[in-house]
Amino acid sequence: MRHEAESTPLGARLVVLGSAGLAEGFSLIGAEIHPDADPAKVEEVLAQLVKDGSDALVLLESHLAHAGGYWLNRLRNEGGRIVVTELPPLSAPQDYAPAVDDVVHAVLGPEALK
């Protein structure tokens, strides 16, 4: 199991925070994982990525993605070298609706995703 920060060949880090079951699955493809993370851990990891100057794709389980926080909100609004996105919960993937769905509905109308 990999918990330490490691870089991909292109220099970007793949970081996953979420339930142990979800995170452990991503460890199989070499992701840096933070199993059973809470919102405070998300903020800690994001702050460290900024401090280190890392390029990263950060995958957050749904409940963490909606928790908010200074660094989470800042990085989502800035864009750039740290991309934060949401993963559906392992226990209820059918309940997942990505945030982009709201944007698509607003721009293209309620029938756009049917």
Image: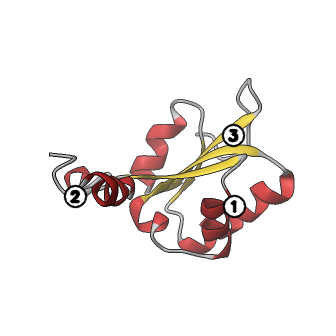
Disc 1, SS: helix
Q: Which of marks 1 and 2 is nearer the N terminus?
A: 1
SS assignment at label 3: strand
Mark 3 or mark 2: whose residue is earlier in sequence: 3
Q: Is residue 105 left or right of residue 71?
A: left
Amino acid type, label 2: Asp
Q: Quadrant of the C terminus?
A: top left
Task: State if disc 2 and disc 3 touch (CB < 8 Å).
Answer: no
On the image, numbered disc 3 is attached to which residue? 13
How many neighbours does mark 3 have within 10 angstroms: few (below 14), some (14-19), or many (20 or more)? Answer: many
Q: What element carries label 2?
A: helix
Q: Which mark is drawn over residue 97? A: none
Judged from this view, the residue extending furthest toward the top is: 9
Q: In this view, does 1 lie to the left or right of 4?
A: left
Residue at point 77% right, 32% down? 11
Image position, residue 20 (x, y; %): 45, 54
Q: Where is residue 28 in the image (x, y as percent from the top left)?
A: 51, 32
- Residue at 38% x, 58% y is 99
**Cα gap from disc 1 to disc 2, whole angstroms:** 26 Å
Residue denoted by label 2: 95
Distance between mark 1 and mark 3 Cα atoms = 12 Å
- Sequence-wise first label, 1 or 3: 3
Seen from the viewer's position, the closer of residues 104 and 76 is 104
